[in-house]
Amino acid sequence: MQESLTHRVTRRLHVGLFLASVALVAYGTLMVWSATSGMTAHDAMFKRHLIGVALGLLPLVALWLVDYQKLKAWTGPLMILLALLILSPRIPGLGGTSKGATSWLEVFGVRLFQPSEPAKLLFIVVMAAVIAEYSGRIDEPKDVVRVAGYAALPVVLILLQPDLGTGMVFVAISFAMLMVGGLRGRYFAIALVAGAVLIGALLMLPKPLEQYQKDRLLVFIDPARDPKGAGYNLAQSKIAIGSGGLTGKGLGAGTQSNLNFIPERHTDFIFSVLGEQLGFVGAIVLLGLFLALLAAALSISTSSRDLFGALLAAGLIGMWLFQIIENTGMTIGLMPITGIPLPFMSYGASAMVTNLGGVGMLMSVWSRRYGT
């Protein structure tokens, strides 16, 4: 009886994914508590974080229980919902602006959530269904154009907010899924060249990027540029992480964070707080947990019974991997500064619900790897 129960549990539950996810949520909760401890709204913010974790369990369980194959039949409605979610902040009276981007949904002045977060999961499902139609080989130009059209629509809509960081996440998701989906190498080369040209155009043209976004990209190219202005965030982040040393100054003991030198320390720059308070050891532990999460997702992708499931896992890997590299990299000057949260770590209910929903989707693929 015990062996039968163990077999049923291991069949439905990917232990590595479960442990990595629980550890990351716990680590993130600890760091949010520490990062917000000196703020006047600490109690309310921490409660909101806990509510976000609790709400995230709903899509996790729901997506785990639902056969992921059934999502294929909803590609059309999900694409429409995806577009509506991204466009919703642009509707008069519903949009809230944060950091220069109209990317929040507000009702009567009450900020509800960031629609582009759950849109990431919808995007992954839609792209997986479209790419899976080609059975692992996308070579014909007309097929490439069709797939690119599905990928480009949400990216363009997000750039209109303008939210460059989130747009980059959608691009990273697309690249990861197209690699698994069998897009020929020459098309990746063309996409990279086109991306380089686009970035150059965005820096030169007055629109669609705002001036502060251009300044961030220019600071990445020249870190010494405007240290008291556009380069201030990066300078303070480097000071915080460097001062943490090997083991850090202790939870809640970071001077850069406590004295408010680190901007957005509970969201975009929470890795800087971690580096200052827990040092190199704390950062290595976090990166190890992220590696465990990505390794678990990769094992689920390779063990999927079909291409659709493998693509779902690949999309989540692309989403998490890019956000991890971008967020941690920007705090030490290796990547341009954007408003991308660190998965499972940054304060924000919208991102937490999305990440836990992604875990549920992976569990669904894993638990049905031998069939329903």
Image: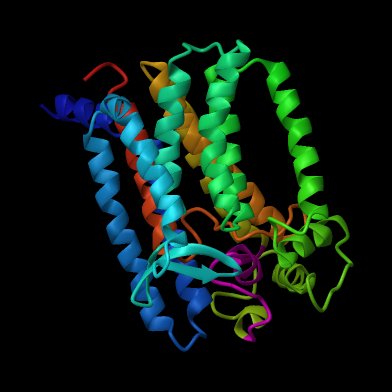
Q: Nearer the viewer, residue 105 or 247?
A: 105
Residue closest to the far bottom? 40
Horizontally, is 120 left or right of 182 in the view? Answer: left
Residue 297 x/y as whole percent = 46, 33
Res. 272 image quadrant: bottom right
Horizontally, is 227 left or right of 37 in the view? Answer: right
Horizontally, is 314 left or right of 72 in the view? Answer: right
Residue 255 x/y as whole percent = 66, 82
Magenta-highlighted residues: 259-279
Res 291 seen here: no
Is residue 42 shown in magenta? Answer: no
Is residue 274 shown in magenta? Answer: yes
Q: Residue visible at 43% across and 15% down? A: 133
Q: Nearer the viewer, residue 181 or 208?
A: 208
Residue 267 x/y as whole percent = 54, 67
Horizontally, is 68 left or right of 211 in the view? Answer: left
Res 50 seen here: yes
Res. 244 image quadrant: bottom right
Asked if residue 132 is positioned above or below residue 263 in the image, the reply reads above
Res. 230 image quadrant: bottom right
Q: Residue visible at 57% across and 43% down? A: 155
Say which quadrant the N terminus sits in: top left
